[in-house]
Amino acid sequence: MKNQEIYCDGKYVWLYLPSNNELIINHYNPEEGKGFEQVFSLFNLEGVKVRYDGQKIIEGRSLDQIYLAISNPEVAYNNATFWINQTSKFLEKVVIIDENQTTITYAFSNFKTDQGLSDSTFVFDITNFDGAIIDLR
C-alpha cells in the first residue's frame, strides 16, 4: 500500500508510516476491520449473489471478472469485483465498495510463490528504529 508498510506474522500487525516515522503495533484480528481475509469469506455467506462477467483483456493479460452483489446486513460491503489471471490463476485485483460507498482496491503485481521467506520477513525489525512507537498490544 502506498505510503505505508504493513507486516503481519498472524499474531501481531506492525503498521509503519514512513512520512511520520511512526510505527503502530497491535494484535492481529482477522475479524476486525476490512481485512483481505474477509473478502474471500464473502463467497460463503447468505445474501451474496455471484456473477461471472466474462473475460477481459487488461494490459495484454486475459482476466476473468467475477462480481459479487452483497445484500447481507451483517456484512460491511455492498459489492466486490475480482479479476483472476486466466493463465496463472492468481488473483490480480479486487475492488470492494463498502456500506459508506468507500472504494477499497487491492492490486497485486510481481506475485511470486515458493520464495523461501523466513518468519522474520513478516515482523517489523525495531532494533534500529528511532521513530515514534505506538504499542497497542
Image: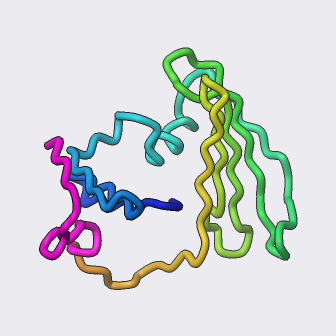
Q: Nearest the camera: 128 or 65? A: 128
| Front one among 36 and 27 | 27
Residue at 65% from the left image edge and 34% from the top image edge: 97
Q: How is the image coloured?
A: rainbow
Front-most of residues 93 and 26: 26
Side of 113 relative to 111 (left or right): left
Extreme residue in the top direction: 73
Indicate left or right for 113 with 106 as reference. left
Residue reaching furthest to the bottom: 116
Image check: 60 left or right of 110?
right
Q: Dividing the picture into quarters, in which one does residue 78 lie?
A: top right
In the rendering, at what x and y percent does residue 55 appear?
85, 59
Q: Position of residue 11 (x, y in %)?
A: 20, 52
Please tell me whether residue 100 is drawn above or below residue 132 in the rendered image: above
| Residue at x 79%, y 45% (from the top left corner) | 52
Q: Quadrant of residue 99?
A: top right
Q: Is residue 121 magenta?
A: yes
Magenta stretch containing residue 106, yes or no?
no
Q: How many marks?
A: 0
Q: Give whichever of 62, 21 is nearer the camera.
A: 21
**Magenta part of the chain:** 120-137
Q: In the figure, residue 8 lies in which quadrant?
A: bottom left
Magenta portion: prevailing SS class = loop
Q: Residue at x 38, y 64 (%)?
A: 18
Residue 20: image x %, image y %? Answer: 36, 57
Q: Residue at x 53, y 42 (%)?
A: 39
Q: Is residue 78 above or below residue 85?
A: above
Compared with 46, 51 (above or below) is below
Q: Quadrant of the C terminus?
A: top left
